[in-house]
Amino acid sequence: MNMPCLDPKHPKRHITHLHTPLGVRSVYDSVSFCTRCGSCQQACPLYRQTRQENFSPRGLNQLVRLFMEGKLTLAKHGADVKAQFAACLLCGQCTAQCAGRVPTAEHVLEMRRALGLRVLPGSLQRFLRLRETNPRRFAVWMYAGLWARRIGLLFLLRPVLPVWLRRLDEMLPSKLPLRHLDFLQQTTYTSRIGTIYMPSWETQWLCPQQGKAVLALLQKKHRVRIWENTATGLFSFLYGDVRESRKQLRKLIRRHRSAQCPVIVVDDIDEYQFLRNAPQLFEGFAGWKSWAENLARSTRFITDFIPLSSLKARRSEGPVRLLGGCYRGPAADVLEKSCKILTTLFKQNFVEYEDPLFGWPPVLAGLAGTSFAIRTEGEIVKNIARTQTKTVVVLSGLTALAVNATLARYYPAAKAVPIAQVVSR
Amino acid sequence: MRLPRACIAALEQIVGPDAVQTTEPALWVNAYDCSLSRTRPDVVVHLSDAQQVPAVVRVLNGYHIPFVVRASATNHAGSCAALRGGAILNISGLNRILQINTQQGFAVVEPGVITGQLQRELAPLGFFYAPDPASESVSTIGGNLAQNASGARCMKYGATLDHVLAADVVLPDGSYLPLSRKDNGPDWIGLFAGSEGTLGVFTRLTVRILPVPKHIHTFLATFPSLAACVQTVSDLTARGIVPRCAEAMDQPTTQAIEAFAHAGYPVSAAALLLLELDGTPMQIKKDTRLLEEICKQNNVLSFVTAKTPQARAALWRGRRSAYAAMARLAPNVMVGDGTVPRSRLPHALQRVRALLNDQHISASLLFHAGDGNFHPHVTFDERHRLSAQRMGKLVKQILQICVEEGGTISGEHGVGVEKRGSMALQYDTATLKTMAAVKQALDPQHLANPLKILPDHYAEKARPACALRPEVAALQAALLAAQEPLYITGNNSRLKTQSRAVLSTRSLNQIYEIDLTNYTATVGAGVLLCALQQALHKQGVYAALPAGNGTVGGAFASGCCPWFYSHVLGIEVLLADGSCIRYGGKFTKNAAGYPLTRLFAGSHGSFGVITELTFKLFATPCKLPQPRVYEEPQDGLLWQRLKNELDPTGRFKSLPEQKQ
C-alpha cells in the first residue's frame, strides 16, 4: 500500500517517519493518531486567542490528514491554510496534553515544508542561516554587530533597522560582554577526549554567563572540551530546508565519530531535543541512521550533570517556578529532572505545576513580532505576576533574555534565570 | 448546499466579515467532533457576543438554512456533525463568566465557558461546580448542558441539568426565551438539557455552585468478583452513605492501566473500586468505619485509605490515565457509554467482556459503580473500513446488551448520530413519536442540528410496545371515549375542580415494586402519598416526597414539589391519542433522547396522563423544602407550541385556556 504523502512531487524535502514519544511512525500514521478528543485545545495559545477550530492543534492535524488523503490539495487549498500553519508557535503544549502524545508541531513543520512557507523575516532568516552555511561570516557579523552596539552605532541606526534587530537590541542587557573575552579564557583545554560542551549560539554571543555556569558545573567532575560555533541543523529543520538540516547533522556526526563518540552536552532545550531526535532525519539512510542514533544517545542536557545529592537547600526571596519551553520531543525527562533539582534547592518555594505557566513561545517568533507570540508572552507574564513569582527558571539562554526583557517592562519584580546559573549560583 | 450570497452578507453584517468563513479547509475542520462522523458544513460563523445569536439564527431561519451549534466539540456521539450541511455556529467565543455569587450560591456564565475554567475561578473562593465530566478541562458548560453530561460525582451530586438554575435560550426561529427553575409549569430547562442543540441555542446560564467539602478521603478496595464490588456500593447506599465517587474497573482493565501508568493498583483482583467520601471529619470517620465493615462483608482483598491531596492524586492517577493507556495503542479509541440498573451491572459487564473476548478485541472496561454506567474503551483504526464496520457492529451489540439488561443506550454521552439507530432498540414507536413531536413543536422546519437523536423511519424499527396494565387500559378506554376536554385529577387535593369532565388516576393506586437493590420504587400515579410513605416505612426506605392527601402523580405534575423532578427516573404516560409512552427506568443516568420526565413534570396534565412513576429511594429520611403553593401555570410560547403538537384536538383541559 502506498503511504499517503503530503508532497509527492518533492519527497526529499520531507521526513518520512517521525520519532514520536511513543515510537517511530510514518507521518500519516502519526497524524492519524489524533483521535479528535480536543484535549489539546485549551493548552494551545493560538486557540485560546482565536477560539477557532482551524487554529487548534486538532484542526491543524486534521488539515494535514485531509491534505495527505487528497481531500484537499496544495495547489487548490494551500493558500487558504498558510495563515494558520504560519501562526503555529511550535510550543508543543498540545503534545504534552495529548493522551496519544501526537507531535502536532512536527506535522506543522511538515506542512510548512510542503507549502514552502517562510515564517521569519527575510533578513533574520538569511542571518541565522549563515551560522550553518558560513560560520565564519556569521562570527564576523556577530562581532561587528556587538561592536556597533557597544559604540552606540546600533542606537543611532535604530530607525532604519529591521524590527527583529531592534527587538533583539532591546532584549540584550546594556553591558553585554563580547564573547570569548571573559568566557573562553576560563575554559580548560585538554588533549584527552572528555565531555564535549557544545554551547548554543546565544550562549556564545549573547549570554556568556550561562556558558560560564555550565562549565563550572561540568568541570567539577569532567574533562571538558568546547566545540564552539557548531551548527547542528536545528535552524534549517525549523525554518528552512530539511536537506540543509541533514547536511549539518552529517557534518556533526562525522565530527562526533572522529572524536570517538564522546558525550555531548548542550545548554539549550531545543538543541537537545533536536539532537535526540536526529535519527528521524535519516530514516531510509541505513548507515547514517545508526550513527545518528549514536549521536542521539551521546547527547545530554546540562541537568544530567547536576547530581541531586550535591545540592543543598537554599533560601529564595519568593516563589520559584519552571517555565516551559518548546517541547516537541523527548523533553519529559529533562523537565522531570529539572523539577527534582528545583525541589531540592528551594523546597516548598518551588511550585510545581500548581498553576501551569504555558510554554514561552519561540524567541524568534517574538523577534519577528508575530502578534500571537507577543500576546502569548503577555499572558505568561500576567500569570507570573498573578502568582507573585520571583524567579522564573528557564531551560535556554535565549528564552531567559526574552523573558527578562518582557518582565523588565511589565513585572520587574521577577527575573528569569537559566537552570545552570540557578544551580551554580 | 450552496448558500445564497445575500445570506452570507447578512451574516457578515451581524458578526463581521472575519467571523464568517467559507473556505474549504475552514469548513472541513469544523466537520467533526470526537466521534467518527465527519460532514462538511457550508459556512462557519464565529459568535463573540450573545446578542448576535438571535439575529444570526433569524437570518438562517429566513433562508431555511440548517445550523449546528458547536463549542469545544468534544462529544463522542457525533452531535456536532452538520448532517444536512448548512451553518456551524461556533460559540466558543461566548466565554465570559459574568457573575459569581457565593452568598446565594450561583454563577452566571456564557455557554462557551470551559467547565474547568469555572472550577479554577471558584476554587480560591472555596466553592465548586459539581458536574465533573472527564473532559471538563476542555468541554464547555453549554456543551455539558446540551449533552446533559455528568461525571464521577454524579452519584452524589447529579448531572449537569440538576445544577442549572436558569438558562436563556434562542429557539430555532430566533425567538428569545429566558427560562428559570422558579417558573411554574414543566421543567423547560430539563427538557432542553440533553437536547444536543436540536431545540435551540443557550446564550446564558445560571449554574449552582456549592461550598467545597473541607474533608475528602479516597479509598481503594479490591474484590474477588465484580458482583462483590457492586454489592459494596449497594450496601453503602443501603446504610445511607452516598459516596462522592464510586469508580471501578475489571481485572483486564486494571492490568492494562497498571502496565502503562504504574499507579500501584493490585492486578490480581477481579475488580477494583475507587471510592471517595466527603463531609465533616466526624461524619467521614463514622462512614469510613462502616465502609470498612461493608467491604469486609463483601470479602475485600485489599483496602487502602488516602487522606492527603497527594495520596489521593496518586490513587486517581491510574483511573485518569485509562483513556491515555488506550489512545497510545491505535489511532482511534471508541469510548462506549451504556447504563444499566446497578443490580444488573455485574451481569452486563460479564456479557460485554465475553463479547469482546469472542471477537478477540482488547478493551478496557471502566464503570461508575454507583450508577450502573460503564464505558468500554476499545481501540481500532478508522482508516481500515473493516475495522470501523466491526466497531460499529460491536457498539450496537453492547447497546443491545444494555437494553436487554433493562438499561439505556446512553448514560452521559448523548445520542447524536452515532447512537441514533440504537434509539429504536430502547424505545417503542409512541415514545419516539413523542420525542419527534417535541422537536416538531419547537423546530418545525428542522433547522437546529437536524437528523440527530431520532432514527430514520423509526415507526418500522422501534421495539414493540409493552402490554398495558389492566387499570391503564381502562383509563385509556375512558380517555378515548371522552367527548369533551378532560381535567386530569388525582385525589383532587390541589386542583379542586367541580367539573364532571374529569379523568381520575385514583384507580392507579398500586405500588408495583420497591427495589431495595437499586433503591428505586415503581408506583401507579394514583398512589396516595401517605399510603406510599407507610409502605416505604415498612421497608425502611424513604422517598423525597412530602406526606399528604395528594397522589404521587399529582405531586409530580402539579409543580408543587420541583425538587422531586430530579428523583424521577422513569415515567409512563397516556397521550391524547390513547398511545402509551414509556421513558426511563431503574437507572439513574439517561442521556438517550429528550428527557420526557421533565416535560411532564409540572405539566398540570396538559400533555398527557401520567400513569406510572419510577423514582429514587433513600436509606435515610430526606430533608425536604417547603412544597410550593399550588398555582395555575402561566401560558407561554413553549407551552402553546407543545400543546398544539402533543394534544392538537385539545383532549386535555389546558389550564391557561380555562383562565382566559
Image: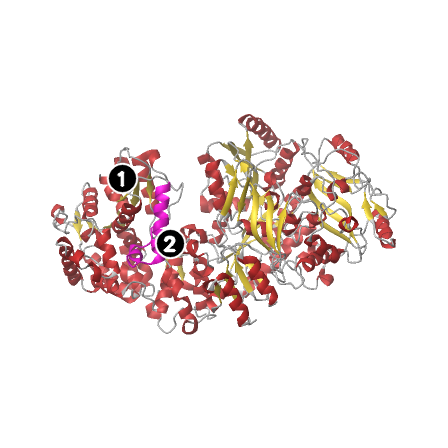
Q: 10 Å neighbourhood of mark 1: few (<14), some, or many (≥20)? A: few
Residue B60, above or below B508:
below
Q: Amino acid at mark 2?
A: Gly
Residue indicated by mark 2 = A92
Residue B63 relative to residue A304: left or right:
right
Instruction: Single out the residue that lies furthest toward the front.
Output: B660
Task: Determine whether the residue tagged by mark 2 lies in a helix, strand or loop.
Answer: loop
Residue A39 relative to residue B542: left or right:
left
Q: 10 Å neighbourhood of mark 2: few (<14), some, or many (≥20)? A: many
Q: Residue B71 colored magenta?
A: no
Q: Identify which residue, B84 or B562, lies in the foreground.
A: B562
- The percent position of residue A132, horizontal first and vertical second, equals 22, 62
Dividing the image into 4 quarters, which one contains the N terminus of chain A?
bottom left
Q: Amino acid at mark 1?
A: Pro
Residue indicated by mark 1 = A307
- The percent position of residue B33, horizontal first and vertical second, equals 53, 58
Dividing the image into 4 quarters, which one contains the C terminus of chain A?
top left
Q: Main secondary structure of the magenta part?
A: helix
Specify which label sits upstream in the sequence, 1 or 2.
Answer: 2
